[in-house]
């Protein structure tokens, strides 16, 4: 579709329960970016791992930066990427950094014209959990490997995100329910396919606007 299209996966380095690595969000975003490139062409850029995950800071698997520090870094990165690419698509796999990414992308588009498209994959599929049945299935479908045993646990609710630290309502880091009997890569593939198709559609719509 575009010869000068770059896809930038943005994730996090945060706890994902006792059974998954802290790179889950980045790995899923990277998988989506790779599948999108197969469909529309372009170039996949290396992912950003360390972003805003302050809500998970009490867990030892989390390494985070404050959003007020991340935003100027991201702005410089996207300015540079926009110089080299006709369009930069930012695939956001971590909900906690979405508003920061959208803010920067919108501001740069106001300044430079439409060159940056930010897509939040969690706006496409409404996962019922963090590190639970849904996210674990998606991670396995993206080719991820578990780092611990699957245990049945239900703690807290995803509606509590953004209101207080995760450690205040989850001891394991799982938010919502993790039910091993319901976890499957096949289930995750259905959600990933929906995400990839959505991103492709957004790119088509975005690039069509640039022709006017």
Image: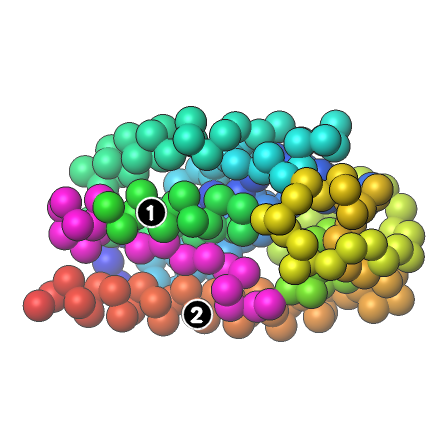
Mark 2 neighbour density, 10 Å: few (under 14) some (14–19) many (20 or more): some
Look at the image and tell me in which quarter the N terminus lies: bottom left
Rendered view: 129 above or below 170 = below
Label 1: element kind: helix
Task: Indicate the secondary structure of the residue bearing disc 2.
Answer: helix
Is the Cβ of the residue at disc 2 closer than 8 Å to that at disc 1? no
Residue 6: percent from left, percent from top: 32, 47
Position in image of residue 7 (x %, y %): 37, 49
Residue 166 image offset from top left, x and y in percent: 71, 43
Residue extending farthest front: 163
| Residue occupying the point 60% across, 67% down | 126
The residue that disc 1 covers is 103
Q: CA distance from mark 2 to mark 1?
A: 21 Å
Residue 123 lies within the magenta run: yes
Task: Classify mark 1: residues with Cα within 10 Å, few (<14), some (14-19) or many (20+).
Answer: few
Question: Which residue is located at x 19 percent, y 55 percent?
Answer: 114
Q: Residue at x 91, y 52 (%)?
A: 151
Image quadrant where residue 85 sits: top left
Q: Is residue 25 left or right of residue 2?
A: right
Q: Which residues are magenta?
A: 108-126
Residue assigned mark 2 = 198
């Amino acid at each position: 579709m575009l010869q000068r299209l770059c896809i930038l996966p943005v994730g996090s380095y945060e706890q994902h329960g006792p059974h998954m690595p802290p790179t889950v969000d980045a790995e899923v975003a990277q998988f989506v970016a790779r599948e999108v490139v197969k469909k529309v062409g372009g170039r996949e850029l290396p992912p950003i791992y360390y972003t805003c995950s302050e809500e998970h800071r009490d867990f030892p698997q989390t390494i985070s930066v404050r959003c007020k520090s991340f935003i100027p870094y991201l702005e410089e990165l996207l300015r540079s990427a926009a110089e080299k690419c006709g369009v930069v698509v930012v695939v956001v796999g971590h909900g906690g950094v979405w508003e920061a990414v959208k803010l920067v992308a919108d501001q740069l588009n106001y300044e430079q014209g439409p060159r940056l498209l930010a897509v939040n994959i969690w706006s496409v599929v409404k996962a019922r959990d963090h590190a639970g049945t849904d996210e674990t299935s998606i991670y396995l479908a993206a080719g991820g490997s578990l780092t611990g045993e699957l245990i049945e646990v239900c703690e807290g609710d995803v509606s509590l995100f953004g209101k207080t630290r995760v450690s205040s309502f989850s001891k394991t880091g799982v938010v919502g329910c993790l039910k091993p009997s319901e976890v499957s890569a096949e289930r995750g593939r259905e959600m990933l396919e929906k995400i990839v198709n959505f991103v492709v559609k957004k790119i088509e719509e975005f690039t069509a606007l640039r022709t006017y």
